[in-house]
Amino acid sequence: SILGQHSASRELGAAIVARWQRDVRGLEVTHRDLAANPLPHLSGASLAQADADEAATAAAVMDEFLSADVIVVGAPMYNFGIPSQLKAWIDRVAVAGKTFRYTAEGPQGLAGGKQVIVAATYGGKHPVESGRNFVEPYLRQVFAFLGITDVEFVSAEGLSVSPGQRVTSMAGARARIDAELPLA
C-alpha cells in the first residue's frame, strides 16, 4: 500500500507474519516493500536486461519468490484492481521457464508447493460475487498459473464507509488471522 503506516493491508500483513513467527520455530522472513522500493514496470529494456541494476533486482526478486515456502501479499484495492506496484512484482515472478512453461497441453505452473496468504483490503464493500472485485479473482488466477493452488485470503471490507465499520472489519480480519488461518 502507498499509505505507509496508515495502511490496513500492511497492518493485516504484519499480523499474518507475526502469527507465523509466533507459531513456527526457525522462521526466516524476507520483507519487500513495493511502495517504498518500487520495482520498475516491465518494459522492452527490462526484458532485454539492458540495465544491469534492474536485471540484478529482478533476479533477487525471483530468488526470493522461488526460495519462499509461504508468501504474504498485502493487496489493497485501487480502482477495482491491485496496485501497479504489485503488478510490477508479479511481472518479475511470472517468468516463462522459471515459474511457468507452455506445453502442448497448455501452460504448466512450475512454482507449486507454496502457500500464499493475501491480506486484501477494500474501502467499500466488494464481495467477489458482486463482479466489482478484480483483486481476488486476478490473484487466484496468477498464482494458479504459476502452479500455486494454496491461496488464502484474509479480507477487510468497507474500511472507508465509517470509522466504526473500519474497526469492525479490521477486528474481524485479525480474529480470523489469530484463530482460523491455516499454517502450512
Image: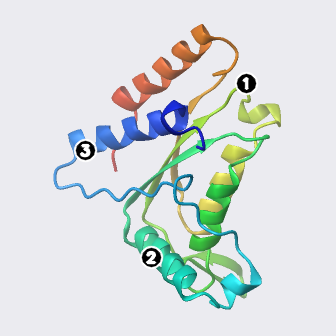
* Residue that badge 3 annotates: 21
- The label nearer to you, 1 versus 2, is 2
- The label nearer to you, 3 versus 2, is 2
- N-terminal label among 3 and 2: 3
Where disc 3 sits, the SS reads helix
Residue at 74% in and 29% down:
126
- N-terminal label among 3 and 1: 3
Front residue of 111/59: it is 59
Visible in this render: residue 144? no
Splitting the image into 4 quarters, where does residue 180 fall?
top left
Residue at 79% in and 40% down:
79
Q: How far across and how far down the image is residue 41, in percent?
A: 69, 69
Q: How far across and how far down the image is residue 132, in percent?
A: 81, 36
Residue 60: give its label. 2
* Residue that badge 1 annotates: 124
Q: How far across and how far down the image is residue 166, in percent?
A: 58, 17
